[in-house]
Image (cartoon, rainbow, N blue to C red):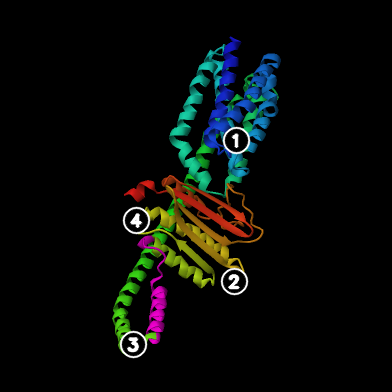
Amino acid sequence: MTILRDLSVLWSLFHILILFMMLYRSRYPRRKTFVFTGICMGPLILLNIMGIEIYGTEFMGKVFMLTCTLPSLLFFWFMSKDKKGRFFFTFCLADTVALWIIAVTNVADFYLGGQQYVLMFIGRLLLFPLAEWVAIRYLRKPYMELQESVAEGWKLFAGMTALYYILLAVHANFPVVITKRPQEFPVFVLILLLMPMTYATIFAAMYRQLLLHRKRQSERILQEQKNTLEAQLDNQLNIRKMKHDMKGYTATLSGLLAAGNIQEAVEYLAGVEKKMDTLSGQFCANPYINATLAYYSRKLGELSAECRMDIQVGEEMLPYMELCRILADGLENVCDALKKLEKDRREVSVHMRYHRDYLLIRIRNRCQEDLYVKRGETVPTSKTEKGHGFGLSAIQEAANRLDGDMVCYTEDGWFMLDVMVRTEEMVEK
């Protein structure tokens, strides 16, 4: 019946990979991630199965942290987009859940299955897919959102899960396997019961963090909408004022022309045109996008920043909610970055133009000289850290909703934020 034992071990190791890969964020595309994982982890699993055949389960249980856990930790650390607390917590989470299932089925088979490995095999055959279903159904989506949005607190959670993993592994296998130490079995049961309670506490704390993040995002969106509406109202008031003043301008211009003062009329008309540009703050024909740009143009003006805007969009139908959010979050980042620079280095430019089926947005601003972001890298998202990333996750979300993408990087002292969104369908509307 050892064939059932070996199959259950193979099944367990295979599903540890599945459980972890559902929760961690690889820095490579999905297909390449699966290929690399198969090439590296497949032989490692087979070697551990061979070790069980040669040395037995008791010996391999004592050294599996060296033969399996540590090599897989190093491999997935290399593959992961996250290198700190988020990665280690996710790794310990998957390994601890798997070790818990292995320990429970092993003990159940010893006391209830007569060490025939039938109960062990059936238990693992059912419990691993059940754990994966729970992860997909309830955990994966909010957990991925949490990894994207929350940067702090992961080290403490990673330390808790790592210590629990070591506690469970050591108590189950040292000095001999737990089934040979019946006097310690009650303590082992308490450790097994402690695991779901520990994770329930951790996930409750994480869920509160997620709700707090969503609340802050909602408040930020409402504030952006308020700023946009206020800017639009200011524009409308300015337009009304211009219409009222236009009567006086027309009368004066008519008088100059009637008197034959052509040069004076030309100079007066140039002054009127300049005043109209100043009052209107007109950057594009779309009132919502224009209101957002006008608001941040004034905000950048208060910082004495040199601002250039080249907005090549007209009155066509556009998803202004998402585009305004992209512009607002991007320009809010710019304001935060420029505050740290000397006034003579505060420069920013905003470009929007069409290219085939896409609308391209580029926000380019001066940044601190020691800031380096490689194209495609994740930018730090905490304002307490040196970076430029607060709000970038919201920009990425908005771009994804429009079937687009976002990339940011530094280049010769400039921070570049490039966003492209698909526009073919909305332009046709």
Q: Is residue 379 found left or right of 232 in the rendered image?
A: right
Q: Is residue 65 found left or right of 359 in the rendered image?
A: right
Q: Secondary structure at mark 3?
A: helix
Comes first in the chain, label 4 or label 2: 4
Q: Is residue 319 visible?
A: yes
Amino acid type, residue under disc 4 in the picture = Glu
Amino acid type, residue under disc 1 in the picture = Cys
Question: Which residue in the protein does label 4 denote?
Answer: 316
Question: Which residue in the protein does label 3 denote?
Answer: 256
Q: Secondary structure at mark 4?
A: loop
Start-end of magenta stretch: 263-288
Are circles 2 and 3 on residues that touch, CB within 8 Å? Answer: no
Amino acid type, residue under disc 2 in the picture = Lys
By secondary structure, the bulk of the magenta-drawn segment is best described as: helix
> Between residues 418 and 310, which one lies in front from this camera angle?
310
C-alpha span from label 1 to label 3: 83 Å
The disc at residue 343 is 2
C-alpha span from label 3 to label 4: 39 Å
Where residue 108 appears, as percent x and y from the top left, is 54, 19
Q: Is residue 189 visible?
A: no
C-alpha span from label 2 to label 1: 48 Å
The disc at residue 92 is 1
Instruction: Place residue 265 in its image quadrant.
Output: bottom left
Amino acid type, residue under disc 3 in the picture = Leu
C-alpha span from label 4 to label 2: 37 Å
Comes first in the chain, label 3 or label 4: 3
